[in-house]
Amino acid sequence: MTGPAWPIAALLVGYPVWWALGFGGLSVIVLAAPMAVLLWRRRPVRVPPGFGLWLLLLTGYLVSAMMLAETPPGTYGELGPGRVAGYAMRLALYAAVLIMMLYLGNLTERELPQLRLVRMLGVLFVTTVAGGLLGVFFPGFSFTSPVELVLPRWLAENPFVQNLIHPTAAQTQKVLGYASPRPEAPFEWANAWGSNVSVLLVWFVVGWWVYGGRRHRLFAAGMVALAAIPIVYSLNRGLWIGLGLAIVYLIVRVGGRTRVALCGAVTAAALAFALSPLAALVAQRLDKPHSNDIRAFTVTATLVAAGHSPVIGYGNTRNATGNHRTITTGKTQWCMTCGHPPLGSDGQLWLLIITQGFTGAALYVAFFLGAIRRHWPDRSPIGLAGVLVMGLVLLYMFVYDGLVTPLSLYLVSFALLWRNA
């Protein structure tokens, strides 16, 4: 695509290329540079309502750097290159998604029509479903990316960085009591895949069903049916809850024949699912809530640590001393599950609380709550979908980290609402 919308097309449609190169979620940082230059040339720059909240969030993260060397109670570790690299990467991501949002909001309808932007998100949904199927059928697929080859070893082997630059099809975890793959391609980890597929599904339905012709709708129905396979095999309860609440939201907010048609489609889909082999896998997952104890431990430890720096946090995550099973720190031959979980790893809310204190968490919530309040009266398909995504953001913050790729999609959705107004 030529014209001023090319960075957005490169980000959304070209995402598989970025993933293969090893940039993946970092692609928004690379593309933020040309977007910033183009924005500067378009002055004056329009800003959306709520812009000040995100600016304060970014400023607060800068201030939190003063606490990078501190070790709160219940954690261990010293200031080192890994901690500084993680902080710098998150700071760059927060700034990059802000630039991307402003860039989208300053493109005219002629330069980037709303429907074209929605359909770009739909293309990324197709990519996500393909990556999910890859993770289900070829879970061992992975390769060394070009970025991984050129980075210094100390940086490339940092666990946070490794997840971003090393393309893999799935994470293998013992969620069901035995090793099972959870799809993550083309994103950084399985939970990011879960968050992203639900947000992209919303926009795919808008672009290819609501605004589509007969062929578009047939294609959309086939893709949604295919998506059910990796969605179930992801074993992702947060994703399942999000999709369920999305259906309830739409039934409540739409009216007339649309509501009747939606109820009929949901009933038919539920019946087909119940008769399929996938239903047994869902039941098995719900019967084994193994991660509840882990989440309870890390959330409690996060709140305790954050209580010692409640206003500005600690700039980055910290490793807990021990875990939910033992006070022993690190794996041993007799306790292979005695890892040291990073605090703030179980949801964007908890990440913000440990990195930026309760102040940062409040600013984040206020930003997305404000978007829901302002755009609730917008009953157009894009308005309904955008408000739904803002609601999913607030739901997922309890269970999914927003960084890296989910936050980009959250702010693209925010920009769609802003442009729609």
Image: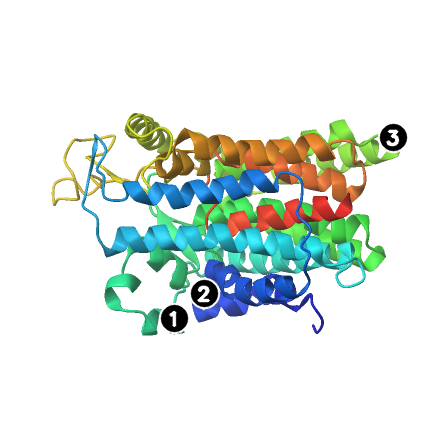
User: Tell me, what colour scheme is on the image?
Assistant: rainbow
Of labels 2 and 3, earlier in sequence is: 2
Looking at the rendering, which quadrant does residue 175 occupy? top left
Of labels 2 and 1, earlier in sequence is: 2
Residue situated furthest front in the rendering: 44
Given contact means CB atoms under 8 Å apart, are the residues at marks 2 and 1 in contact?
A: yes
Q: Residue at x 50, y 67 (%)?
A: 18
The residue indicated by pointer 1 is: 147
**Where, quadrant-wise, is the N terminus in this rendering?**
bottom right
Q: Amino acid at mark 2?
A: Phe
Looking at the rendering, which quadrant does residue 66 occupy? top left
Residue 419's disc is none
Q: Amino acid at mark 1?
A: Val
Q: Nearer the viewer, mark 3 or mark 1?
A: 1
**Measured along the vertical axis of the image, is residue 414 above or below residue 240?**
below
The residue indicated by pointer 2 is: 23
Of labels 3 and 1, earlier in sequence is: 1
Q: Secondary structure at mark 1?
A: helix
Marks 3/1: CA–CA distance? 52 Å
**Relative depth, front residue between 270 and 99:** 99
Looking at the rendering, which quadrant does residue 390 occupy? top right
Q: Secondary structure at mark 3?
A: helix
**Measured along the vertical axis of the image, is residue 138 above or below residue 57?**
below
Residue 256's disc is 3
Left or right: residue 274 versus residue 92 is right
**Where, quadrant-wise, is the C terminus in this rendering?**
top right
